[in-house]
Amino acid sequence: MFIRIFLPRMLTALGVIFGVVCMVFLLLHLVPGDPVEVMLGESAQPADREALRQALGLHQPVHIQLLAYIKGLAHFDLGTSLYSGRPISELMLERLPATIELGLVSLLIALMVAIPLGILAAVKKGTAWDFGAMGFALFGVSIPNFWMGPMLILVGALWLGWFPVSGREGAGSIVLPAITLGTAMAAILSRMIRSTLLEVLTEDFIRTARSKGLTEWVVTFRHGLRNALLPVITLLGLQLGALLSGAVITETVFSWPGIGSLVVESIHRRDYPVVQAAVLLISCSYVMVNLFTDLVYAWVDPRVRLHKP
């Protein structure tokens, strides 16, 4: 049963990752700019530029470079940074813990905000509580990270002086970037929890539970919320992947030393291999999170296991 569910999804995931690798590689080579010129400067001699270009393999046709890159990936070799000359795997391992830390704290904040708000809005439908919760959701969805981040820096760091402006020094430095990422996610999740819980509370088994004399608290949480969370699991998996892509902007705003800021720095330096490796990592994380979400959904809902793909 597990193989029947897992294998088709795994093959699809591998195809998606391969497509991402090829697309990112080709798009990066279409971007104007020469990494050799960035490394040597505009005053370098043409002979020096050509020698470095051949040493890096940039003189070969694009399709030859792509095949060499895919061959390296098959041997788990991400290559070497054109800018620093260090193995890309070392650079990624240095930056990855910061991104994971930011993602987990952002997810925790999102769940702590979204679950109570969604439940409150569903139980108090049509009241001021409902309008207030959904107003917050609309507020969180509408405001982009590149605006929310500077506003939080202005208020929390400059005006109040409670948190550091940027960097990763101490526990307080993660608060503002985590709130920036978690707010948008909380807004989306709270709206989903409200809509699914309202739909579940009109089902026949909920009326049966109420007719048995169960309290509204037990009906809502034990019977309603457990079934309402099934669609939320899928959305949560999608949002976990979105956290990584959203971290590119947030990490840049707060100078957070993670994968996102590494991508931006490498783009400025025309460091193609590092950008490719970072985008590949983000894509693989996105795909694997969604694959894991499918498996969890199949484990939670027996109807998915009975459905033949």
Image (cartoon, rainbow, N blue to C red):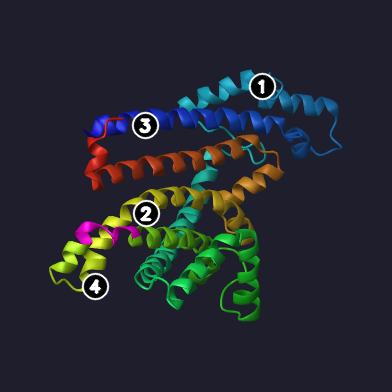
Q: Is residue 240 above or below residue 65?
A: below
Residue wearing tag 4: 217
Residue wearing tag 2: 232
Q: What label sits on residue 10 in the rendered view? A: 3
Q: Residue at x 62, y 22 (%)?
A: 65
Mark 3: few, some, or many residues within 10 Å (few <14, many ≥20)? Answer: some
Separation (CA) of disc 1 from disc 4:
63 Å
The stretch drawn in magenta includes residue 201: yes
Q: Position of residue 271 (x, y in %)?
A: 66, 38
Q: Residue at x 54, y 30 (%)?
A: 21
Horizontal side, residue 294 vs residue 253: left or right: left
Q: Amino acid at mark 4?
A: Trp
Mark 1: few, some, or many residues within 10 Å (few <14, many ≥20)? Answer: few
Classify mark 4: helix, strand or loop: helix
Separation (CA) of disc 3 from disc 1:
29 Å
Mark 2: few, some, or many residues within 10 Å (few <14, many ≥20)? Answer: some
User: Quarter of the image holding residue 27?
Assistant: top right
Q: Amino acid at mark 3?
A: Met
Which segment is the magenta one? 199-206
Which residue is outermost to the bottom?
160
Classify mark 3: helix, strand or loop: helix
Q: Amino acid at mark 2?
A: Val
Residue mark closest to the camera, 4 vs 2: 4
Residue wearing tag 1: 62
Q: Which numbered disc, 2 or 3, marks the residue that appears first in the sequence?
A: 3
The stretch drawn in magenta includes residue 240: no
Q: Is residue 155 above or below residue 78?
A: below
Can residue 258 be seen here? The reply is no
Q: Residue at x 39, y 67 (%)?
A: 112
Q: Amino acid at mark 1?
A: Val
